[in-house]
Amino acid sequence: MLKCTVTLNSKGKEMTILRNNMLDAAYAHAHGNFLLHKANIEVYLENPAGIGEHSDIMEAIQDELDKMAAAQDRMDMLDVFMHEE
């Protein structure tokens, strides 16, 4: 996980800490979602017969990949905000 550095700026130290905390939390949330969907794919790959509610395993895997991509996109965008000066 990326860490934001605390810097003084025109908004003051408190606002910078709050900003960094919010960005860190949003990144952690997106990263957690990424890992959750990755774990789901691993379950589908290791034991596809054990997932009775999904008759189309490939469709289920693609759905999880789409969710991983959305989480990765969010992390990438948060990286932009985390590295702004």
Image (tube, grey):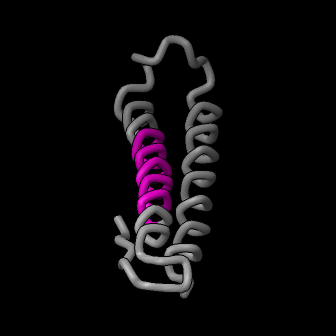
On screen, 26 above or below 51? below
Rendered residue at 49%/68% (across/down): 15
Quadrant of res 21: bottom left
Q: State the residue lying farthest toward the top.
A: 52
Residue 1 locus on image (x, y percent): 34, 64
Residue 40 position (above or below residue 21) = above
Tell me what residue is drawn at x 45 percent, y 62 percent. 18
Question: Residue 77, position in %: x, y?
Answer: 61, 68
**Front-most of 56 and 10?**
10
Q: Which residues are magenta?
A: 20-38
Please tell me whether the stretch drawn in magenta is mainly helix, strand or loop: helix
- Residue at x 40%, y 16% (from the top left corner): 50
Direction from residue 24 to residue 53 in the image, left or right: right
Residue 6 location, x and y as percent?
A: 37, 78
Residue 11 in the image, given as x and y percentages of width and height: 54, 77
Position of the C terminus by quadrant: bottom right
- Name above or below for residue 32 compared with residue 80: above
Nearer to the camera, 81 or 43: 81
- In the foreground, 32 or 38: 32
Q: Is residue 57 magenta?
A: no
Left or right: where 42 falls relative to 58: left
Is 50 situated above or below 84?
A: above
Residue in front for this viewpoint, 55 or 7: 7
Q: Residue at x 47, y 40 (%)?
A: 37
